[in-house]
Amino acid sequence: MLWSLIKIVIFVALVAALTLGAGYLMESSGGIQITAAGMEFNLGPLQSVIAALVLLLVVWLFFKLFALLIAVLKFLNGDETALSRYFDRNRERKGYQALAEGIMALASGEGRVAMAKAAKAERYLQKPEITDLITAQAAELNGDTAKAEQVYKRLVQNDATRFVGVRGIMKQKIAKGDTVTALKLAERAFALKPKHEEVQDILLRLQAENADWVGARKTLGAKLKYGSLPRDVHRRRDAVLALSEAKDVIDSDKSIEAREAAIAANKASPDLIPAATMAARGYIAEGRPKNALRILKKAWDMRPHPDLAAAFAEIVPNETPQERLKRFHQLTILKPEHRETRLLQAELNLAAEDFPAARRALGNLVENEPDTRVLAIMAAVERGEGASDAVVRAWLAKALTAPRGPQWVCDNCNNIHAEWAPICNNCSSFDTLSWKSPPQSDLSATVGAEMLPLLVGPQEVAPTPVEIDPAEAAASEEQQALDAEVIDMVAGNRSTESTGDKQV
C-alpha cells in the first residue's frame, strides 16, 4: 500500500514538472542544452517536449519493470503467489472495467453490448456469479429466453447465486403461463429467502390462483411476521382466504366445515359481505336464525348490500309481502338514508303493491343516481299506479341506457364480475374486488340505445285511432307482456331474492 502511494506521488510530481518545463520551453526562443560525459546535446523546443514525453514513458516502464522485479524477488524468496498477484492486478483492472461497461450498457438497454462486455469480464475475472447475472438480464433484454434460462440454471448450481437463478426461472415460467412450475419455484425461492417481499407476493398470488388456500394463509402469516403487511390488512386478507377455503369445502359437500370456516372468516372481517352471507346461511341451516340475524344486521350496519338482504329474506322464506316488509324494518332502520336501504324499501313496497310508498322510498335517487335498477323500479311503480304504456316505456328506455349501478369491480383493471371472487379473473389480482359503480362505457350506452326498439318497441305516441286489425291487437298484447318482462330483466334478480316470490 505504501509503495503504491509513493509511486502515485512520484508520478504526479513528474507530470507537474514536465508540464511546467514544457510551458517554459514553448515560451522561450531557445531550447535545452544537455552536457554529459564531455558531450553536448542541443534540443529545440519541440524536441525538448518529445524528449520529455519519452522520458515519461521510460519512467513508467521503469516502475513497471521495478514492480515486476520486486515480484520476482518475492517469488524467489518463497512467496509462490507473488508473480500471479502481479499479473492478476492487471487482469482485475481490465475485468472490472469491462464489468462496469457491461452494467452501463445493460442500464442503457444495449443488450448485445452488455453480453459482450460480460463475456470479456468473465475472461479476466473468472467470477461467473457476477458476469452470469449480467448475461442473463442482457439475454432477456434481447428476447433470448433460452439463453437466459440456460444462464439462470448455472446460477442455481452456485450457493451464492441460487436464489437469483430460481427467481429468474420463476419469472420466466410466469411469463409463459406455466403457473404450476412457477408455484414450485416460488416455494423454493421463499424457502431460500422468506423475507423477500416480491417472492412473498408472487407465491401468495400463485397459491391463490391454484386454490391452495391453506398454503396461501401460511404465506400471508409470513408476510405479517416479517413486517411486509400491516396487521389490519392481514386480518382482512386472511378472512378472504378463509372464505375461499369455505367455498371449496362447500363444493366438496362438507357443510359443517364450510359453516365453521365462513363463521371464522366473518368474525375476522365483519365487513366482508360474502363471508357474512355464507356464515348467516350456515346458521340458518343449523336452525339458529338469531345468530344469522345478528351477523346480517352487523354487516348491514357496516356496509348495506343486496346479498345481505337476500340472506335476510331466507331466514323466514314463507311469509307474505306485508309480513316481510314489517320484518325487514329491523334491517332498514340501521341505515335509513343509505342508497341500498332505500332501494330495498322500494322493492319491498312493490312486492306489497304499495306503489306510492315505493315512490317515496326512492326519493331523489331518480334525479341524483339514476342507474338501471332505480329506473327499472320507477317503471314498475308507474305501471303499478296505472300509467300509460308510453310512460312506462320511457322509463324503460332510460333504464336500458343508464349505468348499471354498483357491481363487483376489480380495483386494478375495472373488470366486472357477476359475483364476488378472491381473485380477479382478468388480471389475477388478489382481493381487489369492490362493490362500486364501474366506469361507464359510451359504447355500451350506444349499444343499449340500438337494442331498445327490439326490446320495448317504438315509443312514439299512437297516431289517430283507426280500425284495429285482430292480428295487431294480439301483437299489442304481446308487446305489453314484453314490457313487463323487460322491467324484470332490467331490474335483475335482486328484487326476487330480497322481496320474495311476488313480482310486479
Image: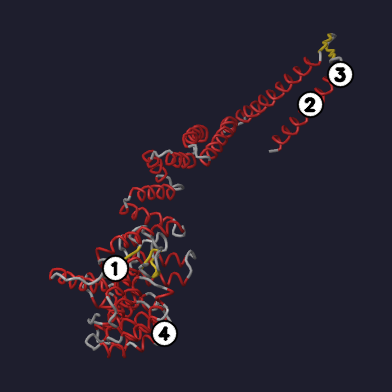
Dot 2 amino acid type: Thr
Along the viewing direction, whichever of 326 and 81 lies nearer the viewer: 326
Which label sits in the foreground, 1 or 3?
Answer: 1
For this orientation, the residue located farthest to the right is 29
In the picture of the structure, the residue carrying the numbered disc 4 is 336
**Distance Cα–Cα, label 2 vs label 1:** 98 Å
Q: Mark 4 and 3 residues: CB-CB less than 8 Å, in contact? A: no
Residue, x 72% and y 36% (percent of image)?
5
In the picture of the structure, the residue carrying the numbered disc 3 is 28
Residue, x 31% and y 79% (percent of image)?
382
**Distance Cα–Cα, label 1 vs label 4:** 36 Å
In the picture of the structure, the residue carrying the numbered disc 1 is 459
Q: Which mark is residue 19?
A: 2
Secondary structure of the residue carrying tag 4 is loop
Q: Mark 1 and 4 residues: CB-CB less than 8 Å, in contact? A: no
Q: Is residue 149 visible?
A: yes
Dot 3 amino acid type: Ser
- Determine whether 469 is above or below 109 in the image: below
